[in-house]
Image: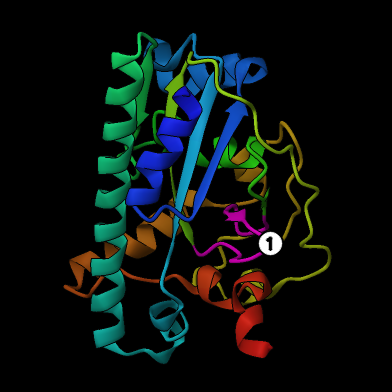
Amino acid sequence: MLEENIKKILNNFMIDYYGVADISEYESEIVKYGGELVAGYPRAISMGIVFPSTIVDHLNDSNNIVKIEYDHCYEVINNRLDNIASVISSYINKEGYRALPISAAERVNSDYINASFSHKLAARLAGHGWIGKNCLLITPDHGPRVRWISVLTDAPLNITGKKMEQKCGSCMACVEICPTKSLHGRNYKEGEEREERFDVKKCDRYFNEMKNNEEVPVCGMCLYVCPYGRKKIHS
């Protein structure tokens, strides 16, 4: 009944992805970045909303209107996800279980540039996709064109899916299009540090430079170019 009610709530919010991950074996990694706040939760609810392709497909147009609309869409989807996570957490709490909603986009460490919990970890363990060379979660149907959020909980929910084999293979599209050359072109390897695959500080400086130049801080080239996100266009 608990799980059925959660799914009914999510249907009203037009959620595109829902899954539950067993995160218990990643406790030390989770606490390393999020501290005691995120400790002691055996499961994570992973939820995602797909970016409209009607915007993402035009990110390579160098059009300021496209950037403005994408920036607005990004903020709206994050707000939708935050609201959904809050509602789901409140419901789980009322049922007598613990639940912690993790913000869709807030950073807790400006030096390492990370959130209190990895939404990509939850999405991957819930069976939604794999980590690509762009260090984003790649789904088979929409590529990286999905924003994610997580709710940590001890509620007895059924685990969905399983870790998916990475399917980037020899594709280097995101590496080649990256304007800052921040991506190293390495396939994801379990336990490997993010810096082995991605210079996140170089990427972050690029966004800060755009802000300082009073430009709309939008890139999204790694979303735009991924074949798994663009396959519907080709078909």
Residue under the image location 76 percent in, 53 percent down: 187
Q: Nearer the viewer, residue 199 or 53?
A: 53
Q: Is residue 139 left or right of residue 199?
A: right
Q: Position of residue 154 (x, y in %)?
A: 48, 13
Q: Nearer the viewer, residue 20 or 5?
A: 5
Q: Position of residue 171 (x, y in %)?
A: 77, 71
Q: Position of residue 33 (x, y in %)?
A: 46, 24
User: Can residue 108 be spotted in the picture?
Assistant: no
Residue under the image location 78 percent in, 52 percent down: 166
Amino acid type, mark 1: Pro
Q: Regarding mark 1 in the picture, which secondary structure is present there?
A: loop
Answer with the quarter of the image where residue 123 lies: top right
| Residue at the outermost left position | 214
| Residue at the outermost front position | 1
Instruction: Inspect the magenta stretch and tell me whether residue 188 lies in it.
Output: no
Q: Is residue 177 left or right of residue 202?
A: right
Q: Which residue is mark 1?
A: 140
Whether residue 71 is situated above or below residue 65 in the rendered picture: above
Q: Nearer the viewer, residue 113 or 91?
A: 91
Whether residue 5 is situated above or below residue 66 in the rendered picture: above
Q: Position of residue 46 (x, y in %)?
A: 50, 38
Q: Magenta span: helix, strand or loop, mainly?
A: loop
Q: Nearer the viewer, residue 146 or 213?
A: 146
Quadrant of the drawing holding the C terminus:
bottom right
Q: Is residue 79 left or right of residue 110?
A: left
Residue under the image location 46 percent in, 11 percent down: 39
Instruction: Inspect the magenta stretch and tell me whether residue 139 lies in it.
Output: yes
Q: Which residues are magenta?
A: 132-145
Whether residue 59 is situated above or below residue 88 in the rendered picture: below
The colour scheme used here is: rainbow
Residue under the image location 22 percent in, 65 percent down: 211
